[in-house]
Each structure stands twice: as structure tokens, then as C-alpha cells.
Image: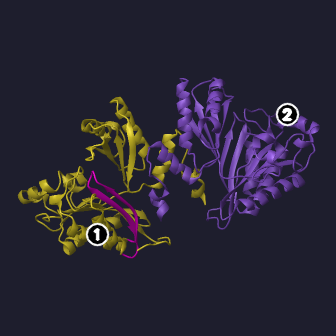
Chain colours: A yellow, B purple
Amino acid sequence: MSITKPLKGPIVECVPNFSEGRRPEVIKVIMNEIDSVPGVKILDLHSDSDHNRSVITFIGKPTAVVEAAIAAVRASERLIDLNKHEGVHPRLGAADVIPLVPIRDICMSDCIDLARDLAKRIWNETEVPTYLYGFAALREDRIRLEKIRLKGFEQMRELVKKDRKKRPDFGGPGLHPTAGASIVGAREPLIAFNVNLRSKDLKVAEEIAEAIREKNSGLAGLKALGLKLSSGRCVQVSTNITRTDLVSPYRVYELIKGEAGKRGVSVAGSELVGLMPLNSVVMSARDGMMLDSFDQSRVIELNL
Amino acid sequence: MSITKPLKGPIVECVPNFSEGRRPEVIKVIMNEIDSVPGVKILDLHSDSDHNRSVITFIGKPTAVVEAAIAAVRASERLIDLNKHEGVHPRLGAADVIPLVPIRDICMSDCIDLARDLAKRIWNETEVPTYLYGFAALREDRIRLEKIRLKGFEQMRELVKKDRKKRPDFGGPGLHPTAGASIVGAREPLIAFNVNLRSKDLKVAEEIAEAIREKNSGLAGLKALGLKLSSGRCVQVSTNITRTDLVSPYRVYELIKGEAGKRGVSVAGSELVGLMPLNSVVMSARDGMMLDSFDQSRVIELNL
């Protein structure tokens, strides 16, 4: 549904990641499923053929968002076969990760309830087993996405057979034979921000990713992976900024640029997957220009 | 008046510059005069003791903005004596420049009418003569502010005696003995953006200002001055970005940083006088991070 009037009341954002970035016709079907639910609005699609992955960003009323997410998982279960999927990004499911994010007039505890309801209904209605992560996790060792996903589908479908502790929260015990499992959660807004380097040396991207991670860079909540784009034209440092209240995308860009420079490599450009919060834009402008006292109160339109 | 509820209907911005940046008690009186008019909202005060100049940014309903501007000029006429004023920034009046800017639901031709009405009323009600500039200019040689102001009060009070063509549009023929003349106009939003350099050499700032002006830098509508801050701690490149639709503050910062680097000088920081439009913040984030496809549609809150 196309909505041109403003959305009122509580708004949740959903940012499902699908393991398909090369067949636009498949993504189109999934997008249509989401779009056909009244009360949701698609804001962005980011398809990447190197990652062979697509990230759809949509917002809407809480109940509508849950319906749209289930419809999208059902379509991905039908259309994506992980046995035939290759890409540089780790993945466990056809619909891989499905985070819910509180945007307006809704608190995290409501999003946790929504995520748990969504995870249960995905198993009941599509036969894709689900794990819960982030604030919606039911076990402490499942708070972090990477601790659930490990090396992805091929590894996990074997592990669940041997180790009860690896089994899904809903459904299973085994993974779905073609759609794997989906990881549903609730989280704060996050920025998925990638920087491409003028180099074909994966080791350079991996070294930089290692150097800028939270424990090494000092930038709170920064996650990073070094990837080689399968088109082969360059390598990429792929990051998640989780403490958007503290760390601007510009700071991450500057840090990567500096680390690349030390290795004689220059930056080819950067890329935002999905959207970013307004304050991250303001903080990036501030940090990029050494404009110390700059904040939202200094933006004309934000005072009207 | 403090307004907490949103302003409705047409909104005009007024950014008067006063020749006083060292006596906060004087600026406080002027601010109170503006604030006492119902229907206006003060967004920013920027006082600079080096420039000995204060810039107040306020918005409101068109008629309220005109009333507040007249009240502010009246107070400045009473409290500021240009014969005792020293500062690095050129100035012609106690209330030096008074631009009106269309912000919402109002067009430039309405702002031109408002500016002409304001200029006439300032003379009638405060005995400070006025010139019209920008889109409100009545003569082609008065479109550009600097062609009216020339070297400022001391030069102009002599020139108006000898040259009829230099006389004010309203009032005169001479300037006000202590308050000079005010230059009233209508213009598009403009960004006043200064970059401080770690150098005490005025020549460096002047050379950079010269190098980055529109005709040399290729950045459309960019104006620049090299100034020495009277506190003596550093020099500054003071700019006006007039084509905010084309040139981001980040581009200007980067250009100045590059020119400074060529001269072995580093940037100490930058400074925004007043406010900037939302799109300039978005463009700065884009340019600073080489985030080519970034625009307002990728900002979460701007989709609600």
C-alpha cells in the first residue's frame, strides 16, 4: 500500500535481511507482499549482488508490521533455496535476520513482545524455525546475533542435530531444508555502513576491521567485518554502528580512512544500507567539519 | 514571547546583525525587545567579541517579524554608538544588516514587499536611514550588500555628503550620527560559516579567502573574507554560502582545509553563525563520507 498521508500513533521499524541479492524478480515478490499489508510503508531496499543479500526497511503500525514480516518470510521460504545461495555475507536463513526497532510512541518492551509473537507465528504459519536475539532473546547466549548464526546455514544444520543447545527457540529441532531459520529480535536503531577501499587485498580489509572494532578503536559498540566483493573490483569494511547516540558514521569513516592510509590504500566511497537516524546525520556534519557546538537546534526546519 | 506550540501558517526568518558583541547587557535589551512581540520565536544568538558583532536569528509570522525588527532597531539606535565601535567585521549601522528570508508558505515576492515596508518604517519610526539590498533592492547597484556598505560607517558618512548616488533609499540625506544606516533586504537562506586556522598570519587567511571565492574555487556563490581575530589567537576565513542548494558547508570546510594545508597551516575548528537548512546538513554528511546516494529520504525521522 502506498501511504502519502503521515502515519499516526505508535511506529515500529522492521529491517528484514533476505539471502537474495541477484534475482530482482524474487525481491520484487517479497516487496509486494510487504506492500500489500495496509498500514506499512516501505522506505528502502538495498540489494547487493556481492553479498547476495537484500535489506528492506519498512515502518508501520505494530500489528501491521508483524503481518507484513510474516508475509515476507512466507514468500522467501517459497522462493529462496540456501543450498543454491552463495555470497560473502554470513547467513542462516532465506529470511535471515528480522529486527524490530521502536521509532515513535512505543517502548522497547512492546517491541520485545512483538518480536516474540512474530517469532512464534513465523514457525506456526510458515514452518521456518526461529531464534530470538537482541532485547527479545530468551537466553543470554542468544543476545548477540553472531553467537546464534555462527558460520551460517551449512554449519548450523549439522550442529542442531548433535547439540540440543543449538536448537531454535520456536520449531525445529532441525532447520528448514531450504529456508534455514530466521533470527527475530528487538533492538535500538542501528546503522549499517560500509566503506569500500581501492584494494583487492582481503587481508587489508580484515586488518582494518579488526583494528576498528570496539575493543581496539575505542568507538563504543562498533562491529566490523572485512569482505571481498565478489565482483572482485574492491574490498570492503562492513560495519554496524550500534551506539548511534555516541558514534557518528563520519567518525567510523574517518577511522577507516586513517587505517587504510597507513596501509597505502585510499577510500573509494561509502554506502549506507537502509536508513540512519536524523541525529546521526547531524553528528556526522558536526564531526566532519569540527563544528563542535552543532546540534539539531541549529537546523532551521527542526524549529518549525 | 516563548512559544512552545508549533508556529502555523507563513513563516519568515529574520537575521539582523548588530554592531555590538562585547556588552551582553546591550544585546539582552535588544533580544528582550524582539522576544516581547507575540508570534515570533528567537532561535539563536551569536555574539562575537572579535567581530564585535551579534547575529540574532528569529522566525515568526510576517507582520510580527516586521514589528520585532523595528523594535530591535529602535533599541540598537539608543544603545550603540558607532563612533565608539571597533571590530574586524565591516559595518554601516548599529543595526547593520536586516535580511528577511522566506521559510514556509510564503514566497520571495512577499518577502520583498515586507522588506520594503520594513525599511520605510524604520526610517519613519526610528530616524535611522535605510538602504534596500538583495531581492528587495530598488537599484541594480544595490543588489550586493558589499556595494552598499563599502568600507562602512566612517567612509559612508562622508561619501553621502558628496555623492547623491550614495544616499539612503529611505531617509537621509546624511547617516544617523551614532547609528549610521541599516541595510534591509530579502534573500534566500544563507549559511554564515567560519573556519579558524592555527596561524596568526592574516595574509594566510586573506590568501585562502581569495583562493576559494566563487571565481577561483568554482564553488557557486561562495563569498569569503580573511580576518584576524582581535583576541590575536588565530586568523579566520569567514564565509557566506549563498547557493545552499549546490554547495555544502563540508565542501567549503574541505576546500579551506586543503588550501591551509598547502601553506603548512592546520584547521583549529569551524563555527556556524545562526542556523543552517536541513538539506545542508544532509549534503555535508554526504560529502564528508563520500556517501553519494545519500539524501533526506534516507533519514528515518523525515519519513514519518
Residue identified by numbered label 2? B155
Q: In this view, does B172 lie to the left or right of A120?
A: right
Q: Mark 2 lies on which chain?
A: B
Residue B64: give x, y in percent of width and height: 75, 61
Q: In this view, does B244 lie to the left or right of A26?
A: right
Q: Of the numbered discs in the image, which one, if any, rests on residue A72?
A: 1
Residue at left 39%, top 64%? A107
Residue B68: give x, y in percent of width and height: 76, 56
10 Å neighbourhood of mark 2: few (<14), some, or many (≥20)? few
Q: What stretch is highlighted in magenta?
A: A37-61
Query: Secondary structure beneath disc 1?
Result: helix
Dominant secondary-structure state across the stretch colored magenta:
strand
Residue A168: give x, y in percent of width and height: 16, 63
Compared with residue A242, is residue B213 higher up or lower down, i.e. above or below?
above
Q: In this view, does A294 lie to the left or right of A155?
A: right
The residue closer to the viewer here, A189 or A142, is A189
Dots 2, 1 in contact, CB < 8 A? no
Three-letter amino acid code at the position of disc 2: Gln
